[in-house]
Image (cartoon, grey):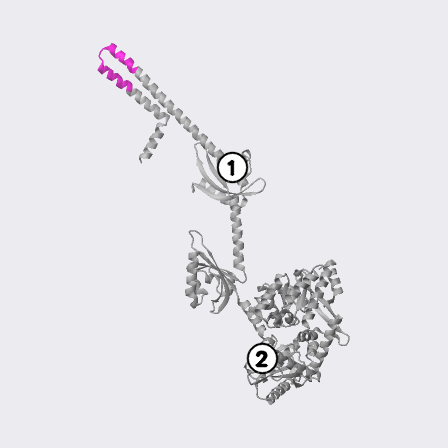
Amino acid sequence: MTRIVKHRHKLLLQRPWFGALLYGIFGIAWITGSDRLLVWLFQDLPTLIQYQAYKGYFYIALTALLAWFLLRQKQHYARSLDNTEQQLAATFTYAAVGIAHVGLDGRFLRANAQMCQLLGYSEPQLITMTFRQITHPADLALDEQAVQQLLQGERQHYSLEKRYLRPDNSVVWARLSVALVHEEAKSYFISVALDITQQRQVQQQLEQSELRFRTLLDNAPQLAIQGYKADGTTFYWNKASEQIYGYSQQEAVGQNLLDLIIPSYMHDGVAQAMAKMAATGQGAPSEELALRRKDGSLVPVYSGHAVIKLPDMEPQIFCIDLDLTERKQQAAELAFLADYDPITLLPNRQYFMQRVAEALQLASNNHCAVLLLDLDNFKNINDSFGHSAGDELLRLVSQRLQRLCLPEHILARLGGDEFAVLVTKISGLAQLNLLTGKLMQALQQPCMLANKVEVIPAASLGIALWPEHATDPEGLLRAADAAMYAVKSQGRNNIAFYDAGLTVQARQRVVMESRLRSAINLGQLYCVYQPQLELSSGRIVGAEVLLRWHDEQLGQVSPAEFIPLAESCGLIHQLGLWVLQHSCHQVSQWLQAGLPAFRLAVNVSAQQFAKDTMLQQLKQVLKDSGLSAQLLELEVTESALMTDEVRVIDTMHQIRALGVRLAIDDFGTGYSSLSYLKRLPLDVLKIDKRFIEHIPAEQDDKQIASAIIALAHTMNFKVLAEGVETAEQLQFLQQQGCDYYQGYYFSKPLAADDFAALLQNSGG
């Protein structure tokens, strides 16, 4: 209150009329009072007159002093006012923000340099314009509303962010603060504007980045992402989480993690892990978990964690879960394929041979037998009615055989149209004769196929006994095979026991082995090349070299006949080395002649791969031919990988160290397991043509091929499909992301000159 009174007194003293009034009162009081005082003090007239003169002099001096004081104060106030006006003017002119005075009609009255720079107009230009002319149309209504509120006294000032239009039609963002000033002469607005264009751009970029990031998170198809507080309360739940766990976003947000997806036996461990992540700011190690869906079922996921911990903010824990359901199914399918035949669902060769080996170890004094059964003229079924009919017949045959085999028997499909039965604890030949008789009788019953065609199958059956005919699993199977081929050579549809001295097949093999040795020495072998193409570009990127043999007496001998023979008689090492040397020199010559570079794929047998000299031979061939190791790819069969695992992996790493690529050939038909495969330094996985030839007709083959491609890519292998013969097969492989293919659809295996011409014309 005292401060207010003093302020009012100060203002009163500054009023001119108040000064004049005070001076008048003082003058009248002085004259009247002093005269009376002098009359009372001095009685004689001369003395009175004399002091009257002194009184006048004193009054003049006093009033002069008062005048000096007043003029001095006025001068001081004038200088202070001038300094204040200069400071205000300097503040207006040199302020780091834009300042303008705007009339009540919206016209600019004056503007400082920063305002002119912000708006892009000079001051003379601005004072001819109103703020409405340069305000972005989208922001004008809000600005006008705020101005009206100021004029109506509803607000003392306002602030907002708005856009101005510059002369070059560019847009500038500003944070505007406006106040209404009332003076005696006029009223006007004081507008202060700060350029925030850069801030808005950064803000917009952040918003766009956040939008993109959130959109990606929300729409990641198989990546379930959830956000949790330290106590497990859910605050983020994307669409993939809805699909995987069954809870909608509305159901999940606000609920506790433990109540949503964590099985009860994991509650304590998860709660401790959440607390630790919140305290340390470090995500828990990624791991595979089985979490709970809304319906109570468990879903396998690979779960990772990230923690966002900012100052003065509660930690946020994000869980990133990858649904492994499909991969588990594919792995299960491939694991099944490792031991079982996909068509008949019977054990395959690998599983059968394992069981034979186990049975022989446990046989002791008991006798065992292997029955090898091959359907007669099965190729005619495929050629006449298609492979789907052939597969259906195989399934019907397997069902009949299963009904006749006892639980202790092992029935398997070895491949193609071959079935095998392992019989243990044989009491006598009568037992075998009874079983084989029933098998042959059951097979000879008519089969009605889906295409309404009735087929009466027949079979040739060979029998080998342990230990009479062989003492190891491979030998036992070979003996049964020899007996079966003896039946075929004698008219088919019969049963025969192994007899090493009489089998026609044995004599034929002796003759063929002799002719093969002569062919090697006489140079009757030659190589052909089948192009390998990249699906994405259609370019020829490689070629598989294949060995061919034309004999003067036997004619064109199939590799399916002489390659197994070469492996059994030990010639495969000589053949394999010749193919490697010949093809590498041939490709080197082509490259020197200017043909485009491509990868040469050479098959390596299991026996070659197991030989200690293979690595040294490979180095020598590369050195002699001058072929770059990066252009060579060795194709290894699955059986080659199942010998000494440690040695095989070490050999493969040494081959890779040379720069040579490695491929696994005919995948899905051999012995390899997934756990073993992932340890191998492979580059390419080749899908066997048996899984390709029935696409797209057979759904099972499509699923198998898709699973193999997905698994190979998961293991960072490239995938090459063999035996592609139709446009439909090629289209399916493209859709599944297969990398390469080869087959008759593009080209059959070509002689060297024909392949060179094809490569030259295609440009690589």
Does 372 sit above or below residue 167? below
Q: Pick the residue in front: 85 or 520.
A: 520
**Label annotation for residue 176:** none
Query: Horizontal and vertical percent for residue 495?
Result: 66, 86
- Name the quadrant containing residue 357: bottom right
Does 559 sit above or below residue 184? below
Give the mark nearer the N terminus: 2 vs 1.
1
Residue denoted by label 2: 356
Q: Is residue 373 magenta?
A: no
Q: Which residues are magenta?
A: 30-56
Query: Horizontal and vertical percent for residue 184?
Result: 43, 32
Q: Pick the residue in front: 79 or 509.
A: 509
SS for dot 1: helix
Identified by mark 1, the residue type is: Gln
**Going by the picture, which residue comes out furthest to the top?**
46
- The answer to whether residue 327 is left or right of residue 632 is left
- The crowd level at tag 2 (other Cα within 10 Å; few <14, some 14-19, many 20+) is many
- Name the quadrant containing residue 232: bottom left
Q: Is residue 533 visible?
A: no
Query: Horizontal and vertical percent for residue 412?
Result: 60, 79
Q: Pick the residue in front: 365 or 137.
A: 365
- The answer to whether residue 331 is left or right of residue 742 is left
Q: Is residue 44 magenta?
A: yes
Residue denoted by label 1: 114
- The answer to whether residue 40 is left or right of residue 405 is left
**Going by the picture, which residue comes out furthest to the bottom?**
430
